[in-house]
Image (tube, rainbow, N blue to C red):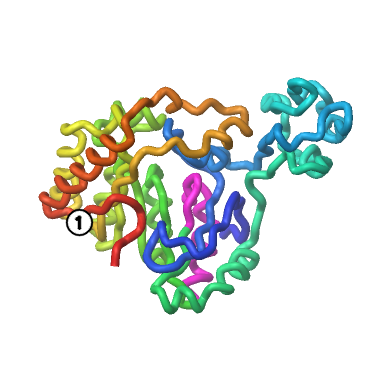
Amino acid sequence: MAESGIVFNIQRYTIHDGPGLRTELFLKGCPLHCRWCSNPEGLCRQPQVGVYRSKCIGRRACGACVQACPAGEEAFRFTVGKLAGIDRTLCTDCLACLEACPSDALKLWGQRMTVDQCMEIIRRDRGYYERSGGGVTVSGGDPLVQSDFVAALFAACRAEGIHTCCESTLCFAWPVVERLLPVTDLWISDLKMMDSARHRHYTGEGNALILRNLQTLASLGQELILRIPIIPGVNDDRANIEASAAFIRGQLGGRVRCLQLLSFMRLGTEKYKSLGMSYQMSDVRMNRRAFQRKVGLIAAYFNSQGIHCLVGTHEKD
């Protein structure tokens, strides 16, 4: 069982991914590539270097990254004398440039942490968990890419009476999910869209495996929060909303703690740029006020179908 994993962010005192005040660990790696993903730094399993040009001192004044890199100058792209990008085909993720940079123009996304290191951080907020009914959430990326590490971390949390929550795409063979059942108190997953071909078009994978895993979790009585990211022109049509409600009522037996609707936002664009990746939803145009009204109407429809539905990720008291 893995005793270490690659973590790219830790948030304390969060209230958005599970009940109460929580410590949330974001792990590297994801089986999907959703076009609207706001955490592109979580897609790749390995640590990555992000480039922030505004902080670069300049090629002439510094050049430490070039001097440190085994691939030399060819691995870097400069514009007007400042670092603008890295040739990812030449980068070996050795992190030498990051260690040499004196100006924080290079940011590390992902570092290896042991279970003990994570627990040291988690224990600091034990009092908050106890008073608020909170605990620990793992997210990503998708934490099940590093399922061995999550199993070890959750076992350590459970041994100390700390509530555990796993936020996953569930796009994994059932044995990967099943091994987490003994140490997971709550699951959070998306029901992005019901049509599998459309799901594959926008995320890179079909949804058959995800839907089967959701059905199995529900049949086993696992506590489950479902989310639908509402994306204009992608999954906000009546047919998809009605099919989603029918699946929750029929295939899941309505056994969900709540359904949360996440309104589309253009998030993470700077991170895409820092990683040399293109943001595929930049051309989405909408009237924000009208869109939020539509999201509210969608929530009202789900509630009319007997499905407890909220707009946003914070569970109302």
Q: Quadrant location of the C terminus?
A: bottom left
Q: Is residue 213 visible?
A: no
Disc 1 marks which amino acid?
A: His
Q: Residue at x 81, y 27 (%)?
A: 71
Residue 46, above or below 133:
above
Q: Is residue 206 magenta?
A: no
Q: Nearer the viewer, residue 123 or 143?
A: 123
What percent of the width, then of the height, locates residue 233?
29, 27
Magenta segment: 138-159
Residue at horizontal 24%, vertical 50%?
Answer: 215
The reply, left or right, for residue 312 in relation to residue 307 is: right
Q: Is residue 315 visible?
A: yes
Percent x, y of residue 77: 74, 22
Q: Secondary structure at mark 1?
A: loop
Q: Is 148 situated above or below 93?
A: below
Provide residue 129's location: percent of width, then percent of height.
46, 74
Q: Which residue is mark 1?
A: 308
In the rendered image, which quarter contains the N terminus? bottom right
Query: Who is closer to the viewer here, 145 or 109?
Result: 109
Q: Is residue 74 left or right of residue 247?
A: right
Which residue is painted at 29% across and 47% down in the image? Answer: 261
Q: In the rendered view, would you say 287 is above or below 181?
A: above
Left or right placement of residue 303 versus residue 128 in this view: left
Secondary structure predominantly adopted by residues drawn in magenta = helix
Q: Magenta span has 140?
A: yes
